[in-house]
Amino acid sequence: MYFKQIAVEGMGCLSYLIGCPGAQAACVVDPKRDVKDYIDLARKNGMKITHIFETHIHADHVSGNMELKSRTGADIYLYEGSPAAYDFKPVREGDIITLGSVRFEFVKTPGHTPHAMSILVTDTMRSSRPWMVLTGDCLFVGDIGRPDLAGAELIDEQVNNLYNSLYNKLGRMPDSLEVFPAHGEGSLCGKGMSSKPSSTVGFEKMNNPILQLSENDFCKRLKVSFPERPKSFTHIIESNKRGAPLLDRCPVISDMSPLQVKQRMEQGAVILDTRDTAAFGGVHIPGSINIGLTQQTANWIGMVIDPDADLILVVDNEQSYSEMCTQLHRIGYDKIWGFLYGGIRNWQEEGYPIAHLWQISAEKLSEKVEAKRYKHFFDVRTAAERDAGFIKGSAHFPLTELLKTPPDIPEDEEVIVYCGIGYRGNIAASYLQNQGFRHVHSLAGGIKAWRNAGLPTED
């Protein structure tokens, strides 16, 4: 049996290429949208991709099933009743598909979504018993899937389904069975996933805190709070139900002159500036949003920018543009018109308006705090981060809340924001500028710089 886990760093998406080189056949489970990795690996190992298995309709990333089907002719398989509008082959509890020496058995495990499934995988060359279970978004390493994505009206049913799937389906499988989920650390489909890419049923039963609860406590806990739902999730779910458009049908991508960028902006395009905090702070296009290019960029874009927005990127170079496009396509942001050719320098040389987002140093901020020379001072980190220490005088205003409801303060008054290392602070500050606030500052280096400067925090 050939087995390969493929991870999308930052987003925490895990997919799988599994096959039998002897039979020259393979399947892909929960594919990401950019599918070249699967095709290259299959070719390298003498296999053709003949099957595509989706454990459920995903909310956090656009599936690559349409891309794979168009390039390989493989059929797509979902659990019966799944709300997909495209042609797929339904599987049911207990159905078996064999690719050479590899056997796949399908198990209904709803809870994260109503039609979710897990897949038992057996390498018959080694044993007649299953070796692993692909759990989709039902069971993660150190966590479980969130049950709220199907809607508030189904939450009671989903929580009960999730309990049954975890305790009465997966929990009764052999302790030695290896667990391979569809997500890991960085995903927004859970709250406390481990960075370890796999586990076993027995280890999770003993050490996963959610699997230590009584049924009553489980149901109570699962209805209390959920991770923030990004703006992108509804768009992604609908894309995956319809079947995502092929990437070669997305808008033509091009370099754009400053005039073209300006004209598109006047028509409502959003400028996404992916440079680092210092570069953006020095000079940027007024109204642009700063979300620097990192492994978790896609998650933050999903929080800040509407999925239907027309996008123009400001990047350091064309390689950064290519990387950014891949991240955007993975979450269904396909309306990418291009990038500002020549960067911000060309924009300046045309004499077009520019803006600044001044970074305030830890030393200068300390002077302001001690002299109480500030109007509005916000800590945009999470509650858990703030509990570990905060800067005196700051009010807690988590970034996820600020993005939903900007502060009710005069737009001409000074606002200072800070986060952990400056990244989220700049997202918050650029968003506030976009909303009309004119005197916004971000703490350079965040609270890390504050502490490294030997300045005190409060508990």
Image: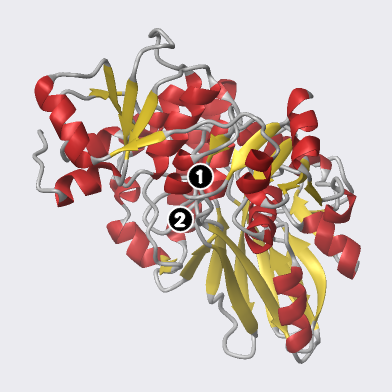
Q: Which labelled disc corresponds to residue 444?
A: none
Quarter of the image for residue 123 reads bottom right
> Is residue 362 visible in this depiction of the protein?
yes
Mark 2 crowd level (few <14, some 14–19, many ≥20, 10 Å Cα): many
Question: Gap between marks 2 and 1, in whole Å?
Answer: 10 Å
- Image quarter where the C terminus lies is top left
Quarter of the image for residue 38 reads bottom right
Count of marks placed on residues: 2
Residue 335 horizontal side relative to residue 365, left or right: right
Position of residue 104 measured from the top left corner of the image (x, y, whole percent): 68, 70
**Amino acid at pointer 1:** Cys
Element carrying mark 2: loop
**Amino acid at pointer 2:** Phe
- Image quarter where the N terminus lies is bottom right
Residue at image point 67% right, 76% down:
18
Of the residues under marks 2 and 1, which one precedes in the sequence? Answer: 2
Residue at image point 43% right, 30% down:
429
Q: Which labelled disc corresponds to residue 189?
A: 1
Of badges 2 and 1, nearer the viewer stands: 1
Element carrying mark 1: loop
Front-most of residues 285 and 305: 285
> Is residue 99 visible in this depiction of the protein?
no
Position of residue 316 measured from the top left corner of the image (x, y, whole percent): 59, 56
Position of residue 200 measured from the top left corner of the image (x, y, whole percent): 41, 68
Residue at image point 34% right, 49% down:
211
Mark 1 crowd level (few <14, some 14–19, many ≥20, 10 Å Cα): many
405 lies above or below 325? above
| Marks 2 and 1 close (CB-CB < 8 Å) | yes
Position of residue 308 measured from the top left corner of the image (x, y, whole percent): 73, 31
Front-most of residues 166 and 184: 184
Q: Which labelled disc corresponds to residue 140?
A: 2
338 lies above or below 39? above
